[in-house]
Image: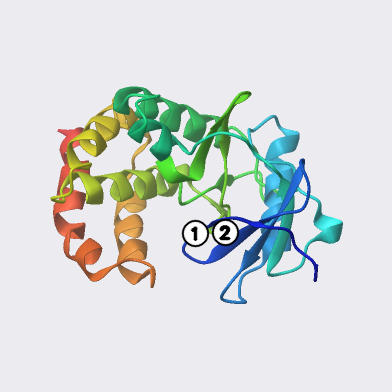
Amino acid sequence: MGITGRLLGSGRVNDVYEIDGAWVLRRSREGWGDAVAEGAVMEHVRAYGYPVPAVRLAESTPTELVMERLHGPTMLEAYGAGLIGAAEAGEVLGRLLRQLHAVPGRRSADCRILHLDLHPDNVMLTPDGPRVIDWSNTEEGDPGLDWGMSAVILAQVAVGDEPIAAPARELLDALLADPAHLTEAGLTEARRRRAADVMTSRREVELLGEAEELVRSYWR
């Protein structure tokens, strides 16, 4: 789409523009990705009742995704505003992961849809309930990897020295109240992927060992 409205927000690689009151355009600043494939996964999980924005694939391109305009803060913003507690946020994340992994894969009945970046900044709290955004990392595979990714992302914050470290630990406690969904293979692969991710900072990479140990402590 050559024409866009006002800029509504920006993430690490994407800008979101207004189309009208019901739809927005998410555009990659880097010019890479496959937004159409991402949108197809969103349509698939939405057909099974999973809470994601609606998309308009016919108007999307590999670098632009037309999707439903959501209203409300991200879970991270809601925590900062005192609208949700860390423990409740962790419970919601866990519920969203379990609900997602009940959706059958598109290519194989033996696999499940994985988000692979499910954390508080990728959940919007709308008047209709939480909605999961940013499906750019989605794959099909074993749910243990999805749990491992979310756990490691939160643990990296929890072992850091930022003010949000303590709430991140509380959120992780709630997410892993039942650690049965974690797997050795999933955790190992999650650490490898976080280390290889070009969007992961040097400091975040340095914290990976301590973060993995924290996640492993929930098995003891």
Residue 216 seen in this snapshot: no
Say which residue appears at 33% left-offset and 66% top-offset. 200
User: Amino acid type of disc 1?
Assistant: Gly
Checking the image for residue 210, the label placed there is none
Say which residue appears at 49% left-offset and 59% top-offset. 11
Which quadrant of the structure image shows residue 88? top left
When the figure is inspected, residue 206 is found, relative to residue 88, above or below; the finding is below
Where residue 3 appears, as percent x and y from the top left, is 80, 67
Circle 2 residues within 10 Å: few <14, some 14–19, many ≥20: some
Say which residue appears at 33% left-offset and 62% top-offset. 194
Q: Are marks 2 and 1 in contact (CB under 8 Å)?
A: no
Where residue 215 appears, as percent x and y from the top left, is 22, 43
User: Exactly how many numbered labels are in the figure?
Assistant: 2
Which quadrant of the structure image shows residue 209? bottom left
Where residue 110 appears, as percent x and y from the top left, is 60, 45
Residue at label 1? Answer: 11
Circle 1 residues within 10 Å: few <14, some 14–19, many ≥20: few
Q: Nearer the viewer, residue 43 or 123?
A: 123
Which quadrant of the structure image shows residue 119? top left
Residue at label 2? Answer: 136
Say which residue appears at 35% left-offset and 47% top-offset. 148
> In the image, 5: left or right of 130?
right
> In the image, 45: left or right of 187?
right
